[in-house]
Amino acid sequence: MLHNPNNWHWVNKNAAGWTKKWLEENLADVQASAGGVSAKIDKVTSMDGDVDVNQRKGKVITIFDVKLVLEYSGKTADDEAVTGNITIPEVAHDTEEDEYVFDIDIFAESSSKQPVKDLVRSSLVPQLRTIFAKLGPALVSEHGKDIQHAPSNNPSSGWRTPTHLQPSEAAAAAAAAAPTTASNKTSNVNTTTVSANEEFRTTAAELYATFTDPARIAAFTRAQPKLFEGAKVGGKFEIFGGNVSGSYLALEEPRRIVQSWRLDQWPAGHYSTLELVFDQNDVDGVTVMRVEWKGVPVGQEEVTRRNWNEYYVRSIKTTFGFGTIL
């Protein structure tokens, strides 16, 4: 039984297994023929990455990022058999339908097999784009009910039917879904400090700019800041559609940033303190970001680390190409 009064707490469900099966079923009918040339998808060779459905405070979202390898087969007009792979490096919750990349390979490639490869590109790829665009809504529809109380079981929850968010909305909702990570001066919450280190293949100056330049903030949060008074002591900000807000407490360019930070649903005046220190290593060409986050409720340490990595570290690396995503 799901124990989550008012649908308040962060609930996470791993849906990777279901997703692979869904892809296998939905890709089975992808095929095309033209001018005596044919091609079809045979199987999902591999799926690597994460697929999660998350719920917090009555809202269900899906966060996924996987690499797919598909096997296809076909025949030329001369009845020559052709097989090969289609690699899609990233199928993600925030990828638009026209942004998917398809790397098409032929086993034992030869010029005579090129018509099949061309057919895959012109006719199978558009079908794949359409199917991938349906994955997010399918995940929410199938798994949202498993991690959220219905109104009859939770009358005060303000429960809503789950909906799939468009890419520009997904990041905002993801941030809003992040766990409470602040200490309230007027509350008796027991808190602790979370520390983390993350390596980026860039300079300290570039990382500093990523957390202070509104254009860069808009890029990795997938939305324009609702408020940005400037990267200065006392400068206020609201990002992720206003779900995250705070102000700059200290700035030492390009090495250190300290922010007050809160979620919109927190009690008034309830802020955490987030300190970022950027240590640049000129020999290796990398910068280590040291994070110290004060005010994390006891018992929420691992959840805080996981969501910080997903919504900030991973997004920054993906957006700006600052290193390998683990």
Image (spheres, rainbow, N blue to C red):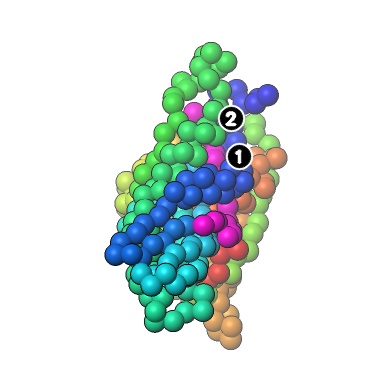
Count how many numbered circles sit on residues in the image: 2
Residue type of the residue flagged with mark 2: Asp
**Residue 148 position within the rendered picture, expressed as x and y whole percent measured from the top left:** 55, 27
Report if the CB atoms under discs 2 and 1 are less than 8 Å apart.
yes
Residue type of the residue flagged with mark 1: Lys
Magenta: main secondary structure: strand
Which comes sooner in the sequence, label 2 or label 1? 1
Kindly report the distance in space between the C-alpha atoms of the residues bearing marks 2 and 1.
9 Å
Please state if 216 lies on the left or on the right of 151 as rendered: left
Which mark identifies residue 13? Answer: 1
Tag 1 secondary structure: strand
Please state if 31 lies on the left or on the right of 275 as rendered: left
- Residue at left offset 42%, top offset 52%: 30
**Residue 194 position within the rendered picture, expressed as x and y whole percent measured from the top left:** 65, 52
Q: Which residue is mark 2?
A: 146
Residues rendered magenta in the picture: 42-60
